[in-house]
Image (cartoon, rainbow, N blue to C red):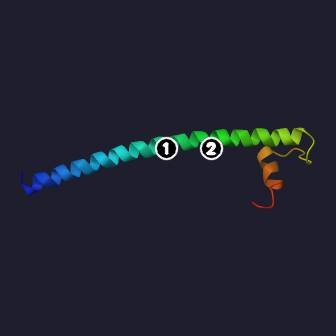
Amino acid sequence: MSTEDSRLVDLELRYMQLDRLVDELSTVVADQSKLIDRLRADLAALAARQLGSGEGDGGDLDPLQAFERDRPPHY
C-alpha cells in the first residue's frame, strides 16, 4: 500500500469516527433539550401551584417570574 493510500484510509477512518461522534452528540443534545423542556414545565406548574395556594402575593406574574422574584437567598 502506498503512502497516499494509507493517508486516504486514515482520513476515511477519522471521518467515520467523527461522523459517529456527531450522531452521538446530536442524540445527547436532543435528550437534554427534552429534559430541559420537561423541567421548565414542572417548574411552571410548581410556581403556579404555589401562587394558587395563597403563598406569596403573585398577582399577575408569570410563574417563572414569580420564581425569580421569590428565589431563595442561596441562589
User: What's the amino acid at mark 2?
Assistant: Ile
- In this view, the residue farthest toward the bottom is 74
Secondary structure of the residue carrying tag 1 is helix
Q: Residue at x 67, y 42 (%)?
A: 39
Between residue 60 and residue 57, name the one nearer to us: 57
Asked if residue 69 lies left or right of residue 28, the reply is right
Q: In this view, does 73 lie above or below 58?
A: below
Quadrant in which the C terminus is drawn = bottom right
Q: Are marks 2 and 1 in contact (CB under 8 Å)?
A: no
- Give the x, y percent position of residue 33: 57, 42
Asked if residue 42 lies left or right of residue 4, the reply is right
Q: Which residue is drawn at 81% across and 61% down?
A: 73
Number of numbered callouts drawn: 2
Mark linked to residue 70: none
User: What's the amino acid at mark 1?
Assistant: Val
Report which quarter residue 40 is drawn in. Answer: top right
Mark linked to residue 36: 2
Around disc 2, counting alpha carbons within 10 Å, would you say few (fewer than 14), some (14 to 19), or many (20 or more)? Answer: few
> Counting residues from the N terminus, which is met first, the one under dot 2 or under dot 1?
1
How far, Cα to Cα, is label 2 from label 1? 12 Å
Asked if residue 68 lies left or right of residue 23, the reply is right
Secondary structure of the residue carrying tag 2 is helix
- Give the x, y percent position of residue 59: 90, 45
Between residue 20 and residue 61, name the one nearer to us: 20
Mark linked to residue 28: 1
Asked if residue 20 lies left or right of residue 54, the reply is left
- Give the x, y percent position of residue 49: 83, 38
Q: Which residue is drawn at 87% across and 42% down?
A: 51
